[in-house]
């Protein structure tokens, strides 16, 4: 299929290009970029007023497949990603069974390929069953195509086991994606420990829960030479430690999620009764569990530092931590509900509204943190729409203003605190390997 994209503002961090031009796609690749291209095409798209950027890459999603398909499956997850402008995603291994061997890796990759939508790369677990005791078959999974290892959903609390995993990752030249949480310090916490948690009578999670493990992991990365990528950073000190590690020449990168630079614990609202199948479902708490996530929403000081970290290129990547749950699971008390929100279909508009329009990021930096930088972290030849590169492209309208409606999501998950929020910026078209996989 040939595609001619006309009159778009082409933003390509890999080459520094930022200008209005036409882009021609042929045989799955970007064939030509230029002014007023005269090409016959199977499909012509007028992108006037829109950004034409490399397809977004999300280093951190949960598709829940295998084992938890009621929440999401690979097909609905891919469709949700395409709606959000994503052409490549990394799925986390905390499934059932855990992705701790090549067979489960192959299952995910084969199922994703059969969906013929976007690129899905399965991350391998660090330990067997994610029990933190014995290393998983990391080398076998690497041969099966994992781009990274992670124990996401928890930290490997045994530092010796974790150190051995890092040594293997360094040898294989794959990054370690770190969920940083000292489980012993969590102590049943469900939200940030501050005046809001006191007001709601909820057990709190301090910044130290995250910061202590970040410090440990950076030290282990230095010792082993492993490439460390810190997931969903949420605190002032997380940014400060990434900055210090980089100044020290360490192979450390950091990621921030839209909910952590958009909301604070003060935004947590009272519970509004919900209806499913015409029946009012009661909830035994006065807080909305759509705001329950891990790490939790922090303070204004933390949010400001995260924004500064992204602005100053201390923090490299914006990921979603897309974590769908069923209505029934979330519609319970704050103490009982699982952590997590969906994010694939709200990330681009939140990034543009909260960061670009507020002057923290340029459109070029938005493309860097959502595409070219994630590609660099995992060492793939993507995040670049120069001629000759694979045509993974997103067309984004920076002018359209609307309200987020969770009922229109392609994801099975509706667990979002952003329902009804007014935002600016909308994904209009997603092209993966030269195929249109989503069009508004």
Image: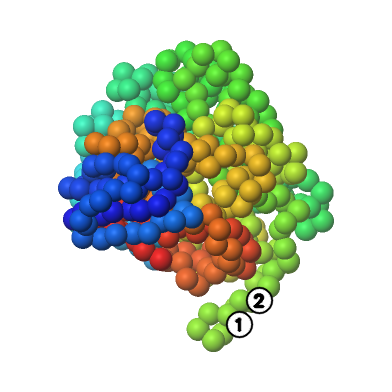
- Quadrant in which residue 133 is drawn: top left
- Asked if residue 85 is positioned above or below residue 277 in the image, the reply reads above
Q: Quadrant of the C terminus?
A: bottom left
In the picture, measured across the screen, residue 104 lies left or right of residue 204, that is: left
- Quadrant in which residue 257 is drawn: top right
- Asked if residue 244 is positioned above or below residue 316 in the image, the reply reads above
Q: Nearer the viewer, residue 437 or 294?
A: 437
Residue at 35% across, 37% down: 384
Residue at 39% across, 30% down: 15
SS for callout 1: strand
Label at residue 221? none
Whether pointer 2 and pointer 1 mark residues with C-beta atoms closer than 8 Å, the reply is yes
Label 1, on which residue? 280
Residue at 71% across, 49% down: 264
For marks 2 and 1 on the same chain, the one whose residue lies earlier in the sequence: 2
Label 2, on which residue? 273
SS for callout 2: loop
Q: Position of residue 418 (x, y in %)?
A: 60, 61
Q: Position of residue 218 (x, y in %)?
A: 53, 21
Judge whether residue 124 can be spotted in this image: no
- Quadrant in which residue 175 is drawn: top left
Judge whether residue 243 can be spotted in this image: yes
């Amino acid at each position: 299929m040939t595609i001619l994209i006309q009159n778009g503002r082409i933003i390509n961090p890999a080459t520094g290009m930022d200008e209005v031009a036409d882009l021609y796609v042929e045989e799955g690749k970007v064939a030509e970029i230029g002014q007023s291209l005269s090409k016959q095409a199977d499909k012509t798209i007028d992108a006037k007023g829109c950004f034409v950027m490399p397809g977004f890459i999300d280093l951190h999603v949960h598709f829940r497949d295998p084992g938890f398909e009621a929440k999401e499956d690979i097909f609905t997850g891919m469709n949700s990603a395409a709606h959000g402008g994503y052409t490549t995603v990394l799925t986390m291994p905390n499934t059932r069974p855990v992705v701790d061997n090549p067979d489960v890796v192959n299952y995910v990759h084969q199922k994703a390929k059969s969906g013929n939508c976007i690129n899905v790369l399965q991350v391998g677990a660090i330990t067997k069953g994610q029990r933190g005791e014995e290393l998983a078959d990391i080398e076998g999974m690497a041969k099966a195509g994992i781009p990274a290892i992670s124990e996401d959903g928890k930290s490997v609390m045994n530092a010796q086991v974790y150190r051995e995993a890092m040594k293997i990752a360094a040898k294989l030249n794959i990054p370690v994606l770190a969920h940083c949480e000292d489980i012993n310090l969590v102590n049943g916490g469900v939200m940030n420990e501050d005046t809001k948690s006191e007001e709601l009578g909820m057990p709190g999670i301090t910044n130290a829960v995250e910061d202590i493990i970040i410090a440990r992991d950076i030290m282990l990365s230095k010792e082993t030479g492993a490439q460390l990528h810190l997931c969903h950073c949420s605190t002032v000190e997380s940014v400060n430690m990434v900055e210090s590690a980089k100044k020290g020449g360490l192979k450390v990168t950091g990621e921030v999620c839209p909910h952590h630079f958009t909301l604070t614990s003060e935004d947590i609202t009272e519970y509004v009764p919900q209806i499913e199948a015409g029946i009012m479902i009661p909830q035994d708490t006065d807080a909305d569990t759509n705001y329950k996530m891990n790490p939790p929403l922090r303070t204004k000081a933390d949010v400001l530092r995260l924004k500064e970290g992204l602005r100053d290129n201390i923090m490299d990547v914006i990921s979603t931590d897309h974590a769908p749950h069923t209505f029934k699971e979330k519609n319970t008390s704050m103490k009982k509900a699982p952590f997590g929100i969906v994010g694939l279909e709200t990330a681009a508009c939140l990034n543009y509204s909260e960061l670009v329009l507020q002057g923290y990021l340029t459109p070029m930096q938005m493309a860097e943190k959502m595409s070219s930088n994630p590609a660099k972290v995992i060492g793939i030849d993507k995040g670049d729409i120069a001629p000759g590169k694979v045509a993974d492209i997103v067309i984004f309208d920076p002018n359209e203003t609307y309200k987020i409606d969770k009922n229109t999501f392609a994801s099975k998950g509706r667990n979002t605190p952003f329902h009804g929020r007014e935002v600016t910026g909308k994904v209009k078209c997603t092209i993966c390997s030269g195929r249109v996989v989503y069009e508004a």
